[in-house]
Amino acid sequence: MNTIVEKLREAYCLDGVAQPTILCNCSENQEEYDQQRQIFNRRFQFMPAAIVLCVTTEQVSVVVRFTRKHALTLRVRSGGHDHEGECSGTDTILLDLSKMNEVEIDPARGITHIQPGTSFQNLTTKLADDDVMIPHGTCGTVCIAGYTMGGGWGPWTRKHGMCCESVVGATLVLGDGTIRKLSMDGNLDERELLWAIKGGGGFSYGIVTELVIKTFELPFEMIKFQIEWNEYCYIPKNKVFAIRDSSPIPTLTVLQAWEAVIASTDPAASQLVGTNLKISARHHAREEGPFNPDTISHNCMMYGYWEGDENSLREFIRQRFEFTGRYTLTIRDEDKAGRKYKHLRYGDHLMSSWDRYSFHNMNRLKQGLEGTPFPPDEDQPGPHKITSRLVDAQGLGKEGHYKLLESLTSPLVLPGNEGLGLYTYITLGAITGNYYQHVITPEQKTKSAFPYKDKLFTIQYQTWWNETEEQKEEGQNNHVYTRINRALDWMDVCREYDIPNTSGAFISFKDSSVPTRTYFDKSYEDLVKIKQAHVKDPDNQFRSRKTII
């Protein structure tokens, strides 16, 4: 048996703490180890020395003290969605918190206690069953801890802010194994640690084994919807996807309309509690002539959560988007929630991956099934690369719009990529809304480390490939590998693209090439001081490439 595992088991015995399941790369539990070592971004294939599946805070504390005593590298994983794979590593002790998934709702105090391995698909259903909710994400398999410590953008952001704004307490294991209960009315170091984990990134300040989050009442009726412009069709002869309409809508028209809606202070716009806009990248050959931002067209998909009935949603869309031209609005009966729809499981019907390409939809087009109902996208793991920036409060402006569209129109994006399962696109996630415009006071804005409360929206550049089981099984014998390097080059170009009225980057959309200070902006210096003063981690054991130090 692995020597490290033997020593770790001994440490649990000496401390009188129940042993968790411990997996290693050996024949005894090889199949389970190979399954458990996988993370969401399949671009990374790590081989941890041991995987420790803890179920209690005391078990976590033992691992922290053990790795410190034996000078071993520690990694922590709840849902495993870190886009740069920093939740695992080869020859590390991987502390897996996915089994810590209990939820306790306190309706009298308007709070919920949530363990770090709780996925949104399960969490949101449990909360909705009690007619309450928290600001959550859009991917059902994402877990609460890393999401919240990164800020926590999602479909409730416009109305209730980032999830981190609702955190009022936590349980934290520090660098020496000390267990601390944090609250808003604790002593100074507890308050500063709590501030740091509210948007200051994961892992740096300790290991969270519970979050205490304020809840809000679940609305009577809400609807998840989508609007598509410049729909694709599949051309079998050339094995490419192309915009169906011979007179497509200029992307600029859609982008400006969406930005105007999220920036609006009109009371009707506040019913749009959250939204994003996905715009597909497209090929532009040099021989096609100069790029024209006023006429260029891309496939565009808007997703949204609407608080209200279907009639009010349709009227809002008619007023705000009818002028854009032809579009397809999709509202499914099963994509409704709220106290009116108690019979529908919230996590099964309102959780879908807004920031991902609709693989089901593309496959439907390849099979000639245009116009048929399509299933919700499952949040499937796959290799990918992401980078980001944010739009300043004044909006992109004319030059910003032009440059953003120019970045999406590139010779590095090859025709036929989608047919091979290679997807390149951006998602724009609305931050501004009633919460940051009106609800939160200037003093309250200082209560979390999330630095970008004044931004209009996020810009997330994405490249994904080999999502399906068939593509995974092809391994290296897959024609997509003749194109991936150019798609990743496109990502590198976009990271450095000069787009006016943009700045910063969002740590939840992690890109290791972005300097750490950029992610935390005005909070950076305070976060470094808190790390050094309160975490009891002098050798920086709680460290990966994008932790605070």
Image (spheres, rainbow, N blue to C red):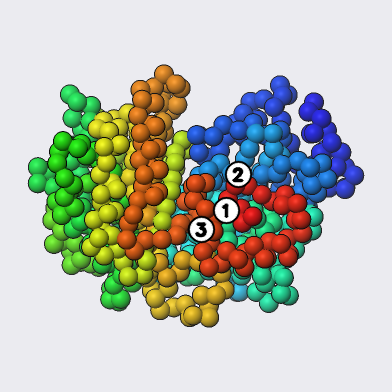
Give SS at disc 2. Answer: loop
Identify which residue is drawn at 67% across, 58% down: 205
Type of residue at label 1? Gly
The quadrant where residue 109 appears: bottom right
Say above or below: 330 vs 323. Answer: above
Q: Give the residue displayed 46% in from the left and 36% down from the top.
A: 382
517 in relation to 439, above or below: above
Residue marked by disc 1: 146
Mark 1 and mark 3: span between their CA atoms? 15 Å
Tag 3 residue = 519
Question: In this orientation, which residue lies closer to the viewer: 391 or 93?
Answer: 391
On the image, which quarter does residue 538 sit in?
bottom right
**Secondary structure category for the residue under label 1:** helix
Q: Which mark is residue 87?
A: 2
Marks 1 and 2: CB-CB under 8 Å? yes
Q: Which residue is at 44% across, 21% downward?
A: 476
Crowding at mark 3 (Cα within 10 Å: few <14, some 14-19, many 20+)? many
Three-letter amino acid code at the position of disc 3: Tyr
Label 2 neighbour load within 10 Å: few <14, some 14-19, many 20+: many
Can you say whether 464 is above or below 127 in the image? Answer: above
Rendering coords of residue 261 (x, y %):
27, 67
For residue 368, which quarter of the picture?
A: top left
